[in-house]
Amino acid sequence: MPPRTMRAVRLHEYGGPDVLRYDEVPIPEPGPGEVLVRVHAAGVNPPDRYLRGGHTRVPGETESTVRLPVIPGTDISGVVEAVAADVEGLATGDEVFGLLRFPSFDGSAYAEYVAAPAADLARKPAGIDHVHAAGAPMSGLTAWQFLIELGHDHPSPFQEARHRPTALDAGTTVLVNGAAGGVGHFALQLAKWKGAHVIAVASGAHESFLRELGADRFIDYTRSRPEELVHDVDLVLDAVGGPGSKRFLRTLKHGGSQFPVLPGDFDEEEIAKLGVTVSSTQVRSNGAQLAELGRLLDAGTVRVAIDSTFTLADARAAHEHAARGHLQGKIVLTAA
């Protein structure tokens, strides 16, 4: 039986990395449809930092549901310790990984134990450890839902139309901007899995890493402007997104698509004139899709790159490291 209390990272106020506190708190009880997971590792993602900074409303929601103190985090890998009576398919001792309750800030992953919806979990691939498994859920599912299969009918908070991935095959050219980061390195590998020709954009320090992952062409954005070198691509997956994303529109062929992970500021007239599509979506927890991704991870077809690891007690240092940017893969917290 697990102890009655655990250690967890909590926010009692919003601010910089220094507001992350390492507390002793009660272990949660799994409710209907949930399992209790002993966390071995937890992934660090941008929404964790948004929450820490006081951004408590998920896009599409009219108000915040966050109440302080709160445990941040959504990505976990660990071992099932207890199972609610109505849960089937999971048992005590199973190794699992998952993206918990997203989109929301209720994941509570920065902890030694978490009550997790069984539907958000998949069995951890046997061929990878907990650290690598914890680096996969949010970034891997984001790339999957943008590129392979959306997998749900929930309306997008960013656009009226339902996001539709572009068919990828040997005749498709894909440009991935921010290819060395969490979402970017998954997007590169998934596009290659489908047979596409992939152009990776990142800083020069990541060239050998991205070529190892299968990039057919590499562009160092610190030395060249990709939009001046690349033309007639079928798809741009912009893992950076934001205001600068519109510069990639002119790399697309007529009929091409651009998928900014963070919605940018686009001119509808320019989009129409170029004859291209811009589409975005919001990643959602999905245990079934994660199981599909897990099979690719287990086979070595896709791998998780780990930028760095920190202990749960050092979550502040992990957030400080994340704020410096230029990551190569994922930051992961390890639980004792």
Image (cartoon, rainbow, N blue to C red):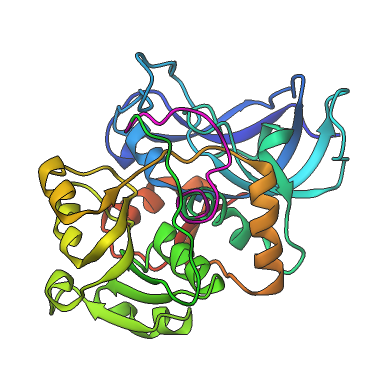
Provide residue 133's location: percent of width, then percent of height.
63, 58
**Principal secondary structure, stretch drawn in magenta:** loop
Residue depicted at 69% across the width and 27% down the height:
27
Q: Nearer the viewer, residue 4 or 235?
A: 235
Quadrant hosting residue 276? bottom left
Provide residue 185's location: percent of width, then percent of height.
44, 67
Quadrant hosting residue 30? top right
Is residue 128 in view? no
Q: Which residues are magenta?
A: 144-159
Residue depicted at 37% across the width and 45% down the height:
46
> Looking at the image, how many numbered discs can be counted on the residues?
0
Q: Nearer the viewer, residue 111 or 221?
A: 221
Provide residue 131's location: percent of width, then percent of height.
60, 60
Q: Nearer the viewer, residue 19 or 128?
A: 128
Q: Say whether residue 301 is magenta.
A: no
Provide residue 57's location: percent of width, then percent of height.
35, 23
Q: Looking at the figure, which quarter contains the N terminus?
A: top right
Q: Nearer the viewer, residue 277 or 309?
A: 277
Q: Is residue 131 left or right of residue 247?
A: right
Rendered view: 266 above or below 225 = above
Is residue 139 in view? yes
Rendered view: 210 above or below 146 = below
Residue depicted at 16% across the width and 56% down the height:
274
Q: Is residue 249 left or right of residue 260?
A: left
Q: Say whether residue 153 is magenta.
A: yes
Rendered view: 85 above or below 258 = above
